[in-house]
Amino acid sequence: MKPGHSEVTARESRRLAKYDGLVSVQPEECRAVGAILSLVGDKWSVMIIIALGHGTRRFTEIKRAIGGISQRMLTLTLRGLERDGLVTRTQFETIPPRVDYELTALGCSLRQVVEPLGAWARAHMSDMKRARQTYDEREET
């Protein structure tokens, strides 16, 4: 009689746990890390972090730097990044009103991680496009 899926999975988990250096992550840590990754893994968040990596910018400058983002989405994403301590918002009481956005130290540390990811994506766009075409052509036959 063959073992079931859960039996095999449990056995494999016990085998892997014997290896030194295996990091055990508790469920509450997984949820916390997942929540952070869902925010910073969002395409708009990443693009805003990269855009602000070049210094303080006004709302319209960020919007121009990021093609395709709506005003509402930019506002919501900036609020989320500010709430998480990645971006600061400075409002000036001028006419017309002026608001500047800037990365915090925490945001700068995230920038060091996401910029290479953005560079990798730009460098491999055509490779992935070709792979998708090849895959889709294979599926059609």
Image (tube, rainbow, N blue to C red):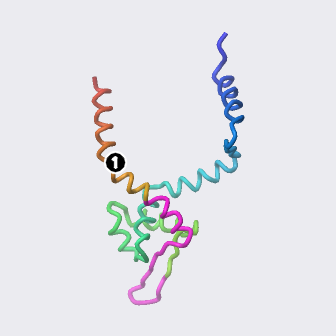
Secondary structure beneath label 1 = helix
Quarter residue 48 falls in: bottom left
Check the image and name the residue furthest to the bottom: 94
Closer to the camera in the image, 49 or 72: 49
Split into 4 quadrants, where in the image is the C terminus?
Answer: top left
Look at the picture and state if 97 lies above or below 15: below
Identify the residue under disc 1: 124
Q: What segment is highlighted magenta in the picture? A: 91-115
Look at the picture and state if 132 lies above or below 87: above
Residue at image location 69% in from the left, 30% down from the top: 15
Please indicate whether residue 93 sits to the left or right of residue 8 in the image. Answer: left
Q: Is residue 106 magenta?
A: yes
Look at the picture and state if 89 lies above or below 21: below
Split into 4 quadrants, where in the image is the N terminus?
Answer: top right
Mark 1, other Cα within 10 Å: few <14 / some 14–19 / many ≥20: few
Please indicate whether residue 124 sits to the left or right of residue 103 in the image. Answer: left
| Residue type of the residue flagged with mark 1 | His
Q: Is residue 21 magenta?
A: no
Closer to the camera in the image, 115 or 91: 115
Residue at image location 71% in from the left, 31% down from the top: 14
Measured as percent of width and height from the top left, residue 124 is found at 34, 48
Measured as percent of width and height from the top left, residue 58 is found at 40, 77
Measured as percent of width and height from the top left, residue 138 is found at 30, 27
